[in-house]
Image (cartoon, rainbow, N blue to C red):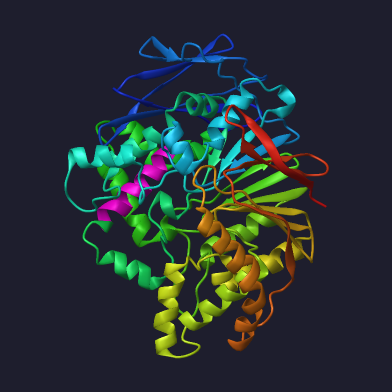
Amino acid sequence: MLRHVDSVSASIWVETGEPCTVTVEAAGRAYRSPTFTVHGHHYAIVDLVGLSQDIASYSVSLDGDQVWPLAGRPASRIRLMPAEGPRRMAFGSCRTSVPHDSAHVRTHGDDVLRAYGVSLMRAGDEDWPDLLLLLGDQVYADNPSPQMLDYIHARRNTEPQGEIADFEEYAELYRQAWTDPEIRWLLSTVPTAMIFDDHDLRDDWNTSHSWRAKMARTSWWPRRVVAGLGAYWVYQHLGNLTPAERADDPLVRELTEGGGDGGPALDAFAAGLDAEPGSNRWSYTRDLGHTRLIMIDTRCARQLTPGDRRMLDPEEWAWLEEQAAAPARRLVIGSSIPFLLPEGVHGVQNWNEALCDGKWGRTAQRLSEQLRQFVDLEHWAAFRRSFEDLSRLLVRLGRPAVILSGDVHYSYLAKASAGQIHQVVCSPIRNPLSRLLRWANVLTQFGLATLVGGLLALLAGIRRPPFRWRVTKGPWFQNALATLTFPDEVEVTWYESTGDGVRPIDSVRLS
């Protein structure tokens, strides 16, 4: 997988079947890295440094035996990030990993990430993205595919029966997600930046203090959360880091230099993170010429204190303030969950949070907490203090800000009345809502909630948000992937699958 790429370097992530030395040959040079081992699985990141031009093709060898590219597939190329910033950025979230046969297309729709890869095989340079952002639910640990369930049931009959239990199963889950030939090719030739959402660990992950208390009483959860965070570190987070950041990371050094199996060290790291989220930062930034990209951890960094809930704890919020204030022409913020929901839903989530904090008494508090978890009332609006903090920060900075999100399984564009703030949602890549749930979302989130959300918030004594906003495009409920094009007038385009490629659903310039 091609991961971090800048104007002078590129990092290639590899998983191998045995310990070995991984060699990447590109532009007449060979770059090497030995594998490191975690729970019997072997990984390497090979950094190609000192690059001065794009690479038309590269190959990968393991102990001298070439294993990439695959026969019959286009060459994997590396396009360096232009010094002035990206020309095009693709993004999306929520992708289930089921086969691409007609039966699964009927139930899950076409895989738009796969279709996008097919389109890129014949696309010209002007259509090629400089970066692909995967904004959460890259895998579904709590709702595995039938193929993944077969794997689970073949190795154990213990709890959790229908979910991932340990690192070994996470490794297989990621293997099934990323080894389809078209997906493998796409991920080998388009740089990726990732952040998790709840299903990478479990539905409603860190929704509230009571959710954590309930899961802590579940016998299999401690092992699962350690495996999930450890697997995320290996499969997603490691490639988000620059070569310099990895060189300074103590865990990277321990795993790559310590020898032996690093599973216990990774498990200890992950267990500490679950107990003390502030012990590591999953959020990160990239300076991309005209754009500053900030990818925010909206799951592990939460403060869940009743009466003082925060999407980002004080330390994480201080970091975000500092990163957002750095010089940049514009901000692109990756948040797995939407910042600007339809206004009525925002009011409902404000109201629910107030009741969860005891606004209408203990009975309403208990029922509201049940409602919060049952219908996923856990977006920025359900952490109102953090919503207002970020709203004021973006207005105060006064520069264009585009917030990219997924999670809700429909796509839309919202524009704030103050400042130059846009919310762009693209979800799902492959996990569509049923027709019944689509209509239910239209009626509740764009109909009923619009009428009652503001009233409920008013009855709970909640002040108005710092600014108004409205949905200006969408919603669309089909599987989709989106792109932003730069550098002057930013344009967003949503795409759907045609079966053997993609076509636009809609496109709009952000002004």
Residue drawn at point x = 52 percent, y = 25 percent: 188
In the foreground, 365 or 385: 365
Q: Count how many numbered circles sit on residues in the image.
A: 0
Q: Which residues are magenta?
A: 222-235
Question: In which quarter of the view is residue 83 placed?
Answer: top right
Question: In which quarter of the view is residue 457 placed?
Answer: bottom right
Residue drawn at point x = 68 percent, y = 67 percent: 391
Residue 250 seen in this snapshot: no
- Left-right relation of 124 to 222: right
Q: Residue furthest left?
A: 157
Look at the picture and state if 164 lies above or below 362: above
Look at the picture and state if 450 lies above or below 202: below
Q: List x then y, in percent, for residue 260.
A: 24, 32
Report if residue 229 lies within the magenta region: yes
Look at the picture and state if 511 lies above or below 23: below
In the foreground, 392 or 445: 445
Q: List x then y, in percent, for residue 329.
A: 78, 48
Report if residue 233 lies within the magenta region: yes
Residue drawn at point x = 53 percent, y = 61 percent: 316
Q: List x then y, in percent, for residue 462.
A: 62, 83
- Left-right relation of 340 to 226: right
Residue 360 seen in this snapshot: yes
Q: List x then y, in percent, for residue 454.
A: 66, 79
Question: In which quarter of the view is residue 65 placed?
Answer: top left
